[in-house]
Image (cartoon, helix red, strand yellow):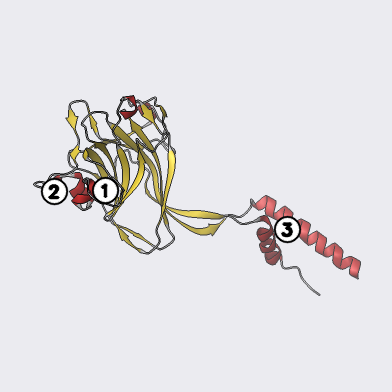
């Protein structure tokens, strides 16, 4: 007597259906505690956690983080000051000072940035090669209301790397329902680690050249994901498919007999 191997049948069908990788996620921060929790705000930085009354709804849950480069009559964290490095955005983010100057750096023609705000993860992030940092962001600005807009910038930092998220010159904007003139709306950003290691993680938004024409950065759903899980069809669908296959195999066997 022979028996049908339903496990083999189900695996065969999954192959026929085309399995798609899913991200197995570890939440770093979704701000649902109503505060920055495991992130620190830069000295004199302007940042808070807001809900949908800000004018934009979070991508999940109730809360989202907001960083601003400045508000009326209030300056944010100075980007560079050789005398007070620990109290600058460069010192807080842990990146070499020259990266924010007009000289060469990891971002071509980075520009002259004067002030901004940053978040820094309190505990270094340990990752494996192939894992990805994923988060949702919305870049907001008043610079689009200017005849000669400055290229305000939002970026993330991983150790000494500066990775652009969005800038005034490169982003596509719509009118914003918030206190800012324009926004990108929420977008998803993914950075994949090519090698294993430990990284200091930060997020920042900075003003270029002037202390006016402020910009902001909304963040939500920051997570570390691994493409190690496989999407399986709903159980009812799988059972039905397996039954069809089993029935077909039994029928074929009966005919042969």
Tell me, yes or no, whether the two marked residues, 3 and 1, touch with CB atoms within 8 Å: no
Q: Give the farthest residue toward the left.
A: 83
SS assignment at label 2 = helix
Q: Earlier in the sequence, mark 2 or mark 1?
A: 2
Tell me, yes or no, whether the two marked residues, 2 and 1, touch with CB atoms within 8 Å: no
SS assignment at label 1 = strand
Circle 2 residues within 10 Å: few <14, some 14–19, many ≥20: some
Mark 2 or 3, closer to the camera: 2
Q: Position of residue 11 (x, y in %)?
A: 66, 63
How many marks are shown on the rendered structure? 3
* Residue identifier under label 3: 242
The residue that appears at 38% across and 64% down in the rendered structure is 195
Q: Position of residue 25 (x, y in %)?
A: 45, 53
Circle 3 residues within 10 Å: few <14, some 14–19, many ≥20: many
Q: Is residue 191 above or below residue 45?
A: below
Q: Is residue 167 above or below residue 162?
A: above
* Residue identifier under label 1: 120
The residue that appears at 68% across and 54% down in the rendered structure is 238
């Amino acid at each position: 007597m022979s028996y049908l191997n339903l496990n083999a049948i189900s695996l065969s069908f999954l192959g026929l259906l085309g399995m798609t990788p899913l991200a197995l996620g570890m939440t770093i921060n979704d701000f649902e505690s109503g505060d920055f929790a495991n992130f620190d705000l830069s000295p004199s930085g302007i940042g808070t956690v807001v809900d949908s009354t800000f004018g934009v709804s979070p991508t999940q849950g109730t809360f989202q983080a907001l960083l601003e480069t400045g508000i009326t009559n209030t300056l944010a964290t100075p980007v560079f000051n050789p005398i007070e490095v620990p109290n600058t955005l460069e010192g807080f983010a842990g990146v070499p000072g020259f990266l924010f100057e007009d000289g060469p750096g990891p971002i071509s023609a980075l520009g002259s940035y004067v002030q901004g705000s940053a978040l820094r993860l309190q505990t270094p992030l340990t990752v494996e090669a192939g894992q990805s940092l994923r988060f949702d962001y919305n870049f907001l600005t008043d610079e689009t209301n200017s005849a000669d807009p400055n290229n305000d910038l939002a970026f993330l930092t991983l150790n000494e790397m500066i990775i652009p998220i969005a800038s005034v010159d490169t982003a596509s904007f719509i009118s914003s329902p918030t206190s800012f003139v324009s926004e990108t709306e929420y977008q998803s950003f993914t950075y994949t680690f090519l090698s294993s290691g430990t990284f200091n993680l930060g997020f920042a938004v900075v003003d270029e050249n002037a202390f006016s024409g402020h910009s902001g950065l909304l963040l939500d759903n920051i997570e570390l994901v691994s493409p190690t899980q496989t999407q399986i069809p709903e159980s009812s669908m799988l059972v039905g498919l397996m039954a069809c296959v089993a029935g077909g195999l039994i029928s074929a066997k009966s005919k042969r007999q």
